[in-house]
Amino acid sequence: MDLYQMTIKMPALAAPAVENLLMEADFDGLQWQDDYATKQVAVTVYATTKQTLQTKSTILQPQIDRLLEFGINPHPFKIEIKPVNGKWKTNWEASYQAERITKFLTIAPTWSDYEPMPNSDERVIRLDPGMSFGTGTHPTTKLALQALETVLRGQETVFDVGCGSGVLSIAARSLGALQIVAGDNDPIAVAATQRNFANNPVMKLNHQVKQQSLLTEQDQLADVIVANMLAEVLLLLIPQVNDHLTATGKFILAGIYVDQLAKVTTALNQQHLKIEQTLTRGKWYALIASKEQR
């Protein structure tokens, strides 16, 4: 497998905002390096094709520039893309091991021979972390997986909005969901989801993968809608949820940083969506909401 890396160097004060942008671009497994003397940081992400990183870089550069509009100075920043060869590549692959994420869910890289213990309730999701999309280890992904484990009882129809790597879809099916509809407006994400579905036999039947914007092209109802994305995008999604969620359905929102929680909560209240449960990891939040019964 070929491997490429993209490194972004920036002032340390801009790092949290840039991390959010990388999250929105469906990167996780970020590697950070600090230079305390210069107050600069560098973050590195990986992909199996140079084109993937070049495409993401083209999108990220103007977004980083626009941080100035929010009072965050990202300059000077530099983006560098280069191949990873030899020992570094071997070490990178070796750094990804199977990891138990929730009570029932374990995520393992596709090259791992990890198997669950016989007669256990453990489900293994196999992902290729070299595809630039989430490996399932970021706090927001863990929160979304935990929320799915909380609400799914079996036989549900699940919409995975902004599917990225497809990890939430695979988890939902592994936890008993009957039908999966995974959607993303990024064709690279759609392709990544399809490849990860192919690596997980549980995804052989009853799923759709669509290139679409949020829920605008959905014409059916879901028992569970799950979205792991930045709050700014969740705020666009929330007004669409009532028309696509069953009367007793659950809406899972992950990717909410602490400073955006109030905005998201207000938006849910305005749409008569009641928060049933709040999950946290550090400064990241996930919410489980449902329709208010009128």
Image (cartoon, rainbow, N blue to C red):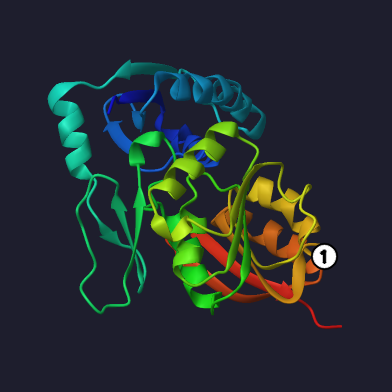
Considering the numbered disc 1 on the image, is that residue within a helix, a strand or a loop? Answer: helix
Residue closest to the eye, 248 or 37:
248
Q: Relative to 272, is 161 on the left or the right?
A: left
- Residue 162 drawn at (x, y percent): 60, 47
State the residue at coordinates (46%, 71%).
Answer: 175
Q: Quadrant of the N terminus?
A: top left
Furthest-bottom residue in view? 294
Q: Relative to 72, is 41 on the left or the right?
A: left
Q: Is residue 89 above or below residue 269?
A: above
Q: Quadrant of the C terminus?
A: bottom right
State the residue at coordinates (60%, 64%).
Answer: 179
Q: Is residue 113 above or below residue 47?
A: below
- Residue 18 drawn at (x, y percent): 49, 34
Furthest-left residue in view? 87
Which residue in the structure is indicated by mark 1? Answer: 270
Q: How many marks?
A: 1
